[in-house]
Image: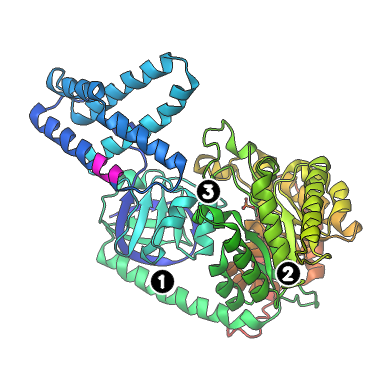
Amino acid sequence: MVEKRGIGVFPGIVTGKAAVFRHTVLDNVEHALADDPERELREFEAAQKSVLDELHSIKPSSREERDMLDVYESMLSDPDYLALIRENIRERKYTASWAVEAATEKYTAALAALGDSYFSERIADIRDAENRLLAAISGIATEIVISEPSIIIADYLLPSELIQMDRKNVLGLLLDTGGSTSHIAILAHSDEIPAVLGLGDISKTTEDGAAVAMDGKEGVAIIDPDEKTLRSFRAKKGVAARAEKELRKGAALPAVTTDGVQIHLLSNIEGLEGLDSAIAAGAEGIGLFRTEFLVLRDSDFDDGRKDSVYAEAAKVMGNYGPVTFRTYDLGGDKIAEGMDRNEENPILGWRAVRFCMERRDIFRSQLISILKASAFSDSVRLMFPMISGSEELVEVLAFFDEVKDECRKKGIAFDENMKIGTMIETPSAAITADILADYVDFMSIGTNDLIQYTIAVDRGNEKIAHLYRPLHPAVLRLLKYVVDSAKKKGVTVSICGEMAGNAEYAPLLVGLGFDELSMSSHSILEVRKRIRTLSRESCVHFADNVLSLPDATSIEKALNEYNQRTVAQGRRYEGYSV
Ligand code: PEP
Ligand code: MG
């Protein structure tokens, strides 16, 4: 039995069988001489054939995919490359994996020496092909095909990979990498998949098919649990199910503080399938529709489908409150077909409005679809991600005006009074919130990105997860500045980053002056319950004090104490039988 601890990102106690997936086996190649070169040769020939068969069975859905498959195939059939591998095994007595690695090194070095950018770009494809070959030799699956309910264990997962999995077979997720606000964590939240990230080496040390017990709240994974552990997990599961049932009882209650201030709780969704959970949790609208996930999930997400998906969201959720469409936040770790995968700094790179303002064809078509949806409900709101300052916002708004003009000319109906907002996700936007407020009706703070850019800590990198501190004084000062600036200008302000969905932060966020919070639907239950115990007046006082503290540790300690004191004192869980 082995216990591993990581970052718990979505609660849930699960036991099941591991389905292990590793993207890369390059690091694992051992440089040992073969005991039996003939056997190594047979293993290589079988692996080469199985990878070619696998490639032939893939139906490319784009020209880029077709090109990539061509490179794989030509490399895996190249007589010189194959001869070199066979020679490495026969003459030099390398193992099959080592022989492949050595031949690929020689091959890519020769391509790189040509100094031609086309060939240099092909090197990544060749390495991928090599990975497939190495994976086949060591019997590791390269396609994530899960045929029975399993706990997925992997080195990392791209959002697009999780999206493509048969979700009913994904009982839980245990990854070597990733932080609490990485996009894979956000997807786990919205799909309610128990998940623990940042587990270090779990994908390397766990056998495919091993028995696993996991607790997504505590961030614990146990491989090969003994009977006693399994019993305790079953008991914990029963307790958690009863607590969840209690929380759900409060779904119809308003999130009102003890001194009568209503805090509006909205849902973050990634597709129409999120609407039912939002309604069940009692969400007062959609505060963030991450529309880019529709594209990642379905590369043929054409104009027609966009129109109907946006319209459906507007019709269904418009009855409950605002429906906020964020324009495509593609880029970073959300790469769609045709985007550059090889940026040096993708998180600081060609993403969100930067991408959309260059690919105006894509942007225009999305804006038209959102405008059309606004004709079905006056609750539709539009919001732009990753705005870095007023000039960029003005350019984006000017383009939006052009698109509206086009619609008017074509007789496309839309809501002329649709509310327009900007996300505040960059320190530059936060610091100029007073200026940005002049151009918009509302602002929504994306704390996931704002924290990573303010502290310069990659939100998806588990190695530096300890530095990702939502309660860093710099972050809190920015939040305070944005709330105050927005309120001064009469602009609505909310948070839609993961901070909003953490019930422990509720006293601080209420105290800072937020009266709208948007989060994954599941988090609404807990946050509502907490808000109903809070006095706004006391929270304001607490937030004022906290803003004078010098560091994240002191603020975390103060918040902890405040939470312990106020939860113990002021139980007002009406509607809950706690
Ligand atoms: C954020 O950055 O906080 C946010 C809500 O956007 P995303 O998590 O999709 O980057
Ligand atoms: Mg963001």
The answer to whether residue 64 is above or below residue 402 is: above
Quadrant in which the N terminus appears = bottom left
221 left or right, relative to 301: left
Q: Mark 3 or mark 2: which comes first in sequence? A: 3
For residue 322, the mark is: 2
Query: How far from the left and from the top, in percent, is residue 66?
Result: 40, 40
Give the labeled residue for mark 1.
236
Amino acid type of the residue that numbered disc 1 sits on in the rendered structure: Lys
Q: Quadrant of residue 38?
A: top left
Using residue 578 as the reference point, say whether residue 200 is left or right of it. Answer: left
Mark positioned earlier in the residue sequence (3 or 1): 3
Q: Tell me residue 377's x, y (percent).
A: 73, 73
Look at the numbered disc 1 and give the secondary structure of its residue: helix
The residue at label 3 has a CB less than 8 Å from ligand 1: no
Relative vertical location of residue 298 with respect to residue 391 in this rendering, above or below: below
What residue did someone put label 3 on?
179
Q: Which residues are magenta?
A: 51-56
